[in-house]
Image: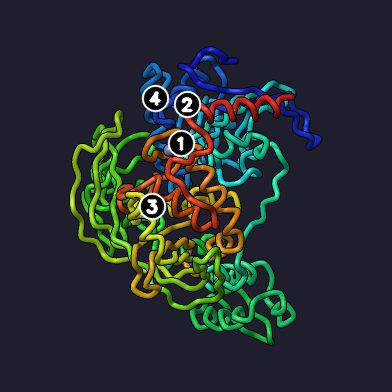
Amino acid sequence: MFCGASGGCAHITVQIRYNNGAPRGPMRFVLWKPPTHTPYVKEVAWLLSVCLESKFRSIVFSRARQTAERILRFARQNMPPDNAGAVTAYRGGYLARERRAIEEGLFNGNLKGVVSTNALELGIDVGDLEVCIIAGFPGTIASTWQQAGRVGRKNKESLAIYIGVETPLDQHFIRNTRALFSSPSERALVDPANPYLLLGHALCAAHELPVTPGDFALWDDIFQDLLVLLEEDGDIIHSGGSYYYNGQIYPAEKVNIRSGPSEPVKLRDTGKSNRLLEILDGNSALSQVYPGAVYMHQGETYVVKDLDLEKESAFLEQQDTGYFTMCGRDKSTEILSTDREKILNGHRLYTGQLRVRTKVTGYVKKDEQSGQVIGGGKLDLPEQVLETTGMWIVFDQAVAETAKRFGLQLMGGLHAAEHASIGLLPLFAMCDRNDLGGLSTVEHKQTLGPTVFIHDTCHGGVGFGERAYDEAEDLFDATLEAIQSCECAAGCPACIHSPKCSNFNRPLDKEGAVMLLHLLLGREYAPGDTELGNKGLDKAIRERLKNFLK
Ligand SMILES: [Zn+2]
Ligand SMILES: [Zn+2]
């Protein structure tokens, strides 16, 4: 449909037929690699505006809420002003009445385009759409196809465009296209003993049907303890051996609130008599609506004037800033207990319970167009404490010597290896990069050695970090491949940068990570020993795509 329309993008087209019995036309699935030096959000926004201009009703799926807002903002800038209202954003946090209005607009065709998070992946009828743009791997292959399947009904031809974003995971799929089209073997991880999750499930279960002693065997032992807690709180009544729901609201609405310790924060628009703009989960408030933060709503930029945690409110003023903000954090990880341990080529690997302390200490302003840092500020906000599960690697002390011998930076190497392996872990555990956190240090005060932590970001943990422990060799092998095959000189978002790094991606040493991963995998390390030289990657991609298309 658009071949030749873009500025030098590599893409392939594959014709897909869904075999689920529903009547639908053929779909073209395009893999799209944005030109280097163009931020993918701009490329996606441009593609969306081209689709809308060509009168194709379109949906964009973005991985993050604020990214969806930025795509919308850029798309509107590309469009004639009187058309800009025909495209909107849709995501969690919007008030129910705003979401209902958007759903109606999509269903009746008044809206021509929408930029959404995975909130529109399932359930809601989005009407007759023709183009789906998937802006980065959504976390699972099943999700990818779910998103693509939202367009093209009633025997009409449709188009899905998968944007290979500059992340290790997306680059992995661009290199290994076949993996994207193979049947998914993804296992969802849910830890049935996580008390934070179980509390919500207990409420929902009691709401559906009274919980009887016969049900206890289905749950972890702590389930009964939680029922007692809920009874004390008055959410559940215990009578005749069974437990009955006694809450006032539909309990599923409470589940998210109970999965973390903080209450949701109300975002208020100071320009409109503090009218409620949206609701943000309490755990995200400190890193998203700190004083000075730029927060986007329906493509408009707001500056946070005040965050009042006691009133559970943040006060925002609409301003056309021309920049966005990112916060920096101080972080420390304490080992509470060790569950499992093993040795991998002389390096020690563990799983266990961790306490992660984070404190937002400042932020930077980045120019909206160029991404350049143009200012910032310091912040003094309360510390957040997360108790969760994770894995950690304690490298043999000899790595410090090796790093010195080759003139590599140990700290930068550990940090880079941490970022890249977190970037690829969703291949092995069914999760999103945002479900994972990490920390690296040249000497941890408990392990007394160079240590990399990979942990869950959900309270209580669900086992993503443990999956990294179980699949350690394959994970670090894939990580090494991702770093070595990246053509950049000293690290980039496609290999070792992290979009949510607490330290603004400093320090990082790409070659240091290559060295550490060699040693971790028990391989001989020689400097500059990259498997794919310059241009090699393109050749490799072409080769794989050619094989795939045969
Ligand atoms: Zn790179
Ligand atoms: Zn980092």
Q: Amino acid at mark 4?
A: Arg
Dot 1, how many residues are within 10 Å of its Cα: few (below 14), some (14-19), or many (20+)?
Answer: some
Sequence-wise first label, 1 or 3: 1
Q: Vertical placement of 14 versus 234: above or below?
A: above
Work out how far the residue at label 4 is from the one at label 1, CA to CA, in angstroms.
23 Å
For residue 249, side relative to residue 73 (left or right): right
Dot 4, how many residues are within 10 Å of its Cα: few (below 14), some (14-19), or many (20+)?
Answer: many
Task: Name the mark nearer the viewer: 4 or 1.
Answer: 1
Task: Name the mark nearer the viewer: 4 or 3.
Answer: 3
Task: Name the mark nearer the viewer: 2 or 4.
Answer: 2
Quarter that holds the C terminus = top right
* Residue 312 appears in the figure: yes
Residue, disc 2: 34
Residue 508 image offset from top left, x and y in percent: 34, 48
Residue, disc 4: 76
* Residue 267 appears in the figure: no
Residue 153 image offset from top left, x and y in percent: 70, 28
Q: Secondary structure at mark 1?
A: loop
Q: Amino acid at mark 2?
A: Pro
Q: Vertical placement of 323 versus 212: above or below?
A: above
